[in-house]
Amino acid sequence: MKFILAVISLMVLVGCAGNRKEQSIEVLSICSEGVCVPAQRDYSQEQMFMNLEAFIKANEGLDTPICVASPDSKICSKEKVCYLVMGGLIPGSGCAKSLTFSNVAATESASIEFETTMPLSFIGTKVSCGSAVSRFSVNSINEVTLELDAYHCSWMVIGQMQATFSFRVESIDIDKGVLGGYWKHGVTGTGNGRGTGYALLTFRNNIDWTKSSTTEL
């Protein structure tokens, strides 16, 4: 009975963890030499799109680490992002430590499309995942998002799941090639869990983030 009650409690926690209110992003910041300013001061939506396209292409095929951080410090505190997952009746940490982008192509709808692989683990063991159709969207100078469509994952053959991931960019460190923002990840199927938080995506290659001659307010 105690075991059943414990499992029910954990399942409630899993559900609550994914229902946290999303943090709003009113202004996307550009950071350089430790100083952050509103992106709209130096970049138009079009120029941000062009820079981001070049940035993703420069890192095509390379693993991009993701780590837990705070929006204030913008310093990694944990090397992976993790959250509680119920693998059937087995509770454990589901984690991701990197993303890899491939087949990058711009579209006419203010988005950059590509495929993403995002390896996962559950209680320290590898979860085999397929690639996800993905996109970076620049809907405005203050609304830049990464979204992965649902992709299939398998844990030890018996665990079949669908995973999703999104990342809303809050800041771009143009000196270091680091995107900071709010992530949301979830799995459904044999394993179920959802997590949210603030993280950093640290890209291997950087670019010259060209400013606009005129900017949009």
Image (cartoon, grey):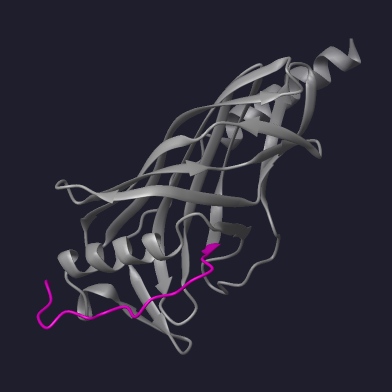
Task: Tell me the residue at 59%/57% (across/down).
Answer: 66
Residue 154 vs residue 139, the one in the foreground: 154
Q: Name above or below for residue 100 compared with residue 77.
A: above
Q: To which quarter of the image does residue 214 belong?
A: bottom left
Q: Name above or below for residue 12 compared with residue 199.
A: above
Task: Tell me the residue at 21%/75% (across/down).
Answer: 43
Q: To which quarter of the image does residue 113 belong?
A: top left
Residue 177 at x, y percent in the picture: 46, 73
Residue 156 at x, y percent in the picture: 77, 22
Asked if the stretch drawn in magenta spans residue 197, the answer is: no
Residue range highlighted in magenta? 201-217
Task: Tell me the residue at 38%/41% (across/down).
Answer: 134
How many tags in the picture? Answer: 0
Q: Main secondary structure of the magenta part?
A: loop
Position of residue 30 in the picture relative to residue 203 (left or right)? left
Q: To which quarter of the image does residue 202 belong?
A: bottom right
Q: Name above or below for residue 210 compared with residue 94.
A: below
Residue 54 vs residue 192, the one in the foreground: 54
Task: Tell me the residue at 54%/58% (across/down).
Answer: 62
Looking at the figure, which quarter contains the N terminus?
A: top right
Residue 90 at x, y percent in the picture: 80, 22
Q: Name above or below for residue 17 compared with residue 100.
A: above
Residue 133 vs residue 78, the one in the foreground: 133
